[in-house]
Every structure is written in structure tokens, then in C-alpha cells.
């Protein structure tokens, strides 16, 4: 992921979609990695899952 965003111009906009995001650990990791390596980017991230139970859980999720 860092290699891909590394090709973007300074201050560029990046859109990321995560399908079947489950509890969100992957989503958190992706966003953390991108923001750590390229804090100048404007990131728009959308995560979706088919399970309503998982979606409701994610609304209150907290990662360190």
C-alpha cells in the first residue's frame, strides 16, 4: 500500500475502498500505514461489510 501511495504527488487525493471489512483491523492498518508514510495525502476511505452486526460493532470500535 505504501508503495502505491508513494507514487502520488504531494497533497494528492487518494480514495481507498475495503470490501468485507469485518471488525476493521485491516481498515485501521491500511489507514495507519498510509498516513504514517504520507501524511500530506488527502485520504478518503470507505469500508463495507454485508453483516449488519459487524457494521453496528464498527460504529463504536476503538483502536489504539
Image: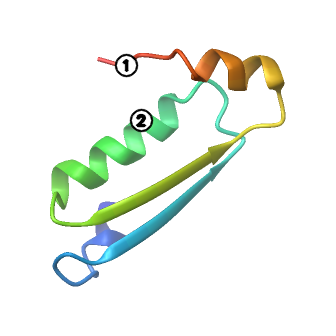
Image mark count = 2
Seen at 36% across and 60% down, the residue is 43
Q: Give me the C-alpha separation between circle 2 and circle 1.
A: 8 Å
- In the depicted view, which residue is nearer to us: 27 or 2? 27
Q: Position of residue 31 (x, y in %)?
A: 37, 46
Left or right of 46: which side holds 1? left
Reading the chain from its start, which is encountered first: label 2 or label 1? Answer: 2
Establish if 32 lies above or below 59: below
Seen at 72% across and 41% down, the residue is 20
Seen at 30% across and 62% down, the residue is 2
Left or right of 14: which side holds 20? right
Marks 2,1: beta carbons within 8 A: yes
Establish if 3 lies above or below 55: below
Left or right of 58: which side holds 37? left
Q: Position of residue 56 (x, y in %)?
A: 69, 19
**Residue 17 numbered tag:** none
- The image quarter in which residue 62 lies: top left
- Dot 1 surroundings within 10 Å: few (below 14), some, or many (20 or more)? few
**Residue 63 numbered tag:** 1
Seen at 59% across and 22% down, the residue is 58
Q: Secondary structure at mark 1?
A: loop
Chosen colour scheme: rainbow
Q: Quadrant of the N terminus?
A: bottom left
Q: Secondary structure at mark 2?
A: helix
Establish if 42 lies above or below 26: below
**Residue 28 numbered tag:** 2
Q: Quadrant of the C terminus?
A: top left
- Dot 2 surroundings within 10 Å: few (below 14), some, or many (20 or more)? some
Q: Position of residue 4 (x, y in %)?
A: 36, 72
Amino acid at each position: 500500500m505504501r508503495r502505491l501511495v508513494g507514487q502520488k504527488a504531494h497533497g494528492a487525493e487518494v480514495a481507498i475502498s475495503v470490501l468485507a471489512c469485518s471488525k476493521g483491523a485491516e481498515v485501521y492498518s491500511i489507514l495507519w500505514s498510509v498516513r504514517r508514510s504520507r501524511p500530506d495525502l488527502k485520504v478518503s476511505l470507505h469500508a463495507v461489510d454485508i453483516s449488519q452486526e459487524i457494521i453496528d460493532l464498527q460504529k463504536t470500535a476503538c483502536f489504539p
